[in-house]
């Protein structure tokens, strides 16, 4: 259970930060073309219609966050016990506010 | 088929909202005495019993929404752009990011409700529940608003 505690406490903030970075830098693990139903690795342009990166951003954040949290789960308990649990909600709230700020232009037109 | 999926998605979101709202009320304003009023009874639910339901409903609603999103991307989104519905458009963009961020807090949410040392993590539990409630309400209201721009089956 202590390993899952560490995993959960690291995964939530790591996932949130990686998701934001993936969106801002377009680090999509894969691309989906909804008009043709095709998947492509990384940033593969759609042969027809728009390209969707949202699923790829989630995959990037989940894989990256999962890998980091998985590694941290094996740190000594004396270290992991000091990880503040408030990061699990604090970082996602900050990222939510950042997205709200960056997309404010849609509400000011 | 898209209409059936959209209605099912809405119903799942509605169930999720019910569970997460009860839970949020119960953690921030637990009843001090025997509940008498409607609001007091809404706060007096056994919160822990909602955890698995919230996680399963969140995942099901997100997966179904993610599938419907493909249709939005090639059809409804252009209507929003061409009609200059920028506030709705922006709110939906935020919804997409908020739902994705909500997925990331689910393991921590499960842990703080189910772990043996949950009592020591009360504030974290309350805040994570509130974050999920905010994401759920935002997603539900914006989804409803966006659907109203065109309407079902148009």
Image: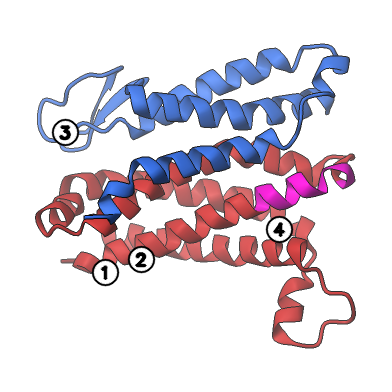
N-terminal of the pair, mark 4 or mark 2, is 4
User: What residue is pinned by disc 4?
Assistant: B50
Where is mark 1, residue-wise?
A: B148
Whether residue B1 can be seen here: no
State whether the magenta stretch is mostly helix, strand or loop: helix
The chain under label 2 reads B
Q: Residue at x 22, y 66 (%)?
A: B149
Circles 1 and 2: CB atoms closer than 8 Å: yes
Give the residues drawn in magenta, as a range.
B119-129
- The residue under label 2 is B144
**Residue at image x 33%, y 62%?**
B4
Output the letter for the chain in blue: A
The quarter of the image holding the N terminus of chain B is: bottom left
Observer-side mark, 4 or 3, equals 4
Q: Secondary structure at mark 2?
A: helix
Which chain is disc 4 placed on? B
In this view, the mark in front (4 or 2): 2
Say left or right for A99 vs A80: left
Badge 1: chain ID: B
Q: Which mark is residue B138?
A: none
Q: Nearer the viewer, mark 3 or mark 2?
A: 2
Residue with the most extreme front position: A108
* Tally of marks: 4
CB under 8 Å between callouts 4 and 2? no
- Same chain for mark 3 and mark 2? The answer is no
Instruction: Tell me if mark 2 has few (under 14), some (14-19) or many (20+) residues whose alpha carbon lies within 10 angstroms of its own.
Output: few
Work out which quarter of the rendered image holds the C terminus of chain B and state it.
Answer: bottom left
Q: Is residue A94 above or below residue B88?
A: above
Whether residues under marks 4 and 3 lie with C-beta atoms below 8 angstroms apart, the answer is no
Cα separation between marks 1 and 2: 6 Å
Residue occupying the point 56% across, 22% down = A65
């Amino acid at each position: 259970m202590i390993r899952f505690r560490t995993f959960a406490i690291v995964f939530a903030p790591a996932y949130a930060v990686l998701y934001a970075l993936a969106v801002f830098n377009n680090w999509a693990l894969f691309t989906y073309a909804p008009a043709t139903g095709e998947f492509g690795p990384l940033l593969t342009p759609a042969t027809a219609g728009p390209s969707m990166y949202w699923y790829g951003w989630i995959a990037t954040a989940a894989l990256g966050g999962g890998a980091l949290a998985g590694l941290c789960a094996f740190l000594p308990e004396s270290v992991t016990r000091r990880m503040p649990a408030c990061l699990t909600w604090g970082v996602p709230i900050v990222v939510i506010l950042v997205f709200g700020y960056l997309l404010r232009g849609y509400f000011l037109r | 088929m898209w209409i059936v999926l959209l209605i099912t998605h809405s119903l799942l979101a509605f169930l999720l909202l019910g569970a997460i709202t009860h839970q949020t009320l119960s953690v921030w304003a637990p009843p001090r005495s025997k509940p008498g009023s409607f609001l007091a009874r809404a706060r007096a639910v056994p919160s822990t019993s909602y955890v698995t339901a919230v996680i399963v409903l969140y995942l099901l609603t997100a997966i179904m929404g993610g599938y419907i999103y493909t249709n939005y991307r090639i059809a409804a989104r252009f209507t929003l752009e061409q009609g200059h519905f920028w506030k709705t458009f922006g709110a939906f963009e935020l919804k997409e990011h908020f739902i994705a961020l909500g997925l990331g807090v689910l393991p921590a949410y499960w842990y703080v409700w189910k772990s043996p040392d949950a009592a020591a993590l009360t504030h974290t539990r309350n805040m994570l529940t509130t974050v999920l409630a905010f994401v759920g309400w935002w997603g539900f209201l914006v989804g409803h608003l966006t659907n109203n721009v065109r309407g079902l089956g148009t």
